[in-house]
Image (tube, rainbow, N blue to C red):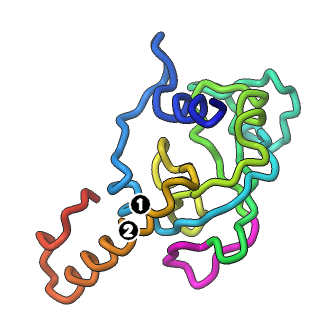
Amino acid sequence: MKHFSLLLWLLLPGMCGATSVMPKSLTNLVAEADHVVIGKVTVVDMIDDEGHQVTNLSARTGPDLPNTIRLNVTVQTNGVLFTTATQVPQNLTIPLWPAWHHTLEQIKGIEEGQTRIFLLKGSSFGFAYVAGCSRELSERPEIERLLKEIKVQNNAFLETGDPASSQFER
């Protein structure tokens, strides 16, 4: 139930005028990811817009609020499923999109201690998209299948130079 609630919070952030984004398919999320790693959320913390720690568990994030919730993740041994980097740090700090309406207490209760698959982008190893980039371990076979397909598609593009050889949105 805890995992289902997280999924709802990440994909359907609320019904009463709350912040929302268009969902993306797992295929497109994997295609957009520069890094796919398995890691354990060791600590959830919050910082304000000046980088100071916020410890009030009732502190909120959302549009026009100065706070950002971050997941501190330890990458598992052999937990890098894919990367474009020469090296993936053992410890990552992944900020959640600050426009989501959450309290520090909510996300700490859901995320701390959880092991997940993270779809990340860029040299800062942030989420590849604002929603749907923290996945359940049960999705690993599908994610690995997509990674293999996408690698084949990308190699076809590199060999032919034909953008039509890719079925994935960028």
| Residue at horizontal 71 percent and vertical 45 percent from the top | 70
Q: Is 116 located above or below residue 31 in the figure?
A: above
Quadrant in the rendering for residue 144: bottom left
Q: In the image, is residue 19 above or below residue 88? A: above
Q: Residue at x 48, y 44 (%)?
A: 132
Place of residue 50 in the rendered image (x, y in percent of width and height, measured from the top left): 77, 42
Q: Amino acid at mark 2?
A: Arg
Left or right of 144 on screen, residue 45: right
Give the left or right position of residue 136, taking residue 40 as reference.
left
Give left or right: position of 164 versus 26. Answer: left
**Residue plotted at (83% across, 26% down):** 57
Which of 96/106 is in front?
Answer: 106
Residue position marked by numbered label 1 in the rendering = 142
Quarter assignment of residue 115: bottom right
Q: In the image, is residue 131 above or below residue 124?
A: above
Are the two marked residues, 2 and 1, in contact with CB atoms closer than 8 angstroms? Answer: yes
Quadrant of the image containing the C terminus: bottom left
Say which quadrant the N terminus sits in. Answer: top right
Q: Position of residue 63 (x, y in %)?
A: 56, 26
Q: Residues within 10 Å of mark 2 (few under 14, many from 20)?
A: few
According to the picture, the residue beneath numbered tag 2 turns out to be 145
Q: Amino acid at mark 1?
A: Glu
Label 1 neighbourhood size at 10 Å, few (<14), some (14-19), many (20+)?
A: few
Left or right: where 72 falls relative to 83:
right
- Cα distance between the residues tagged 2 and 1: 5 Å
Secondary structure at badge 2 equals helix
Q: Which segment did they paint magenta?
A: 80-91
Residue 84 among magenta residues: yes
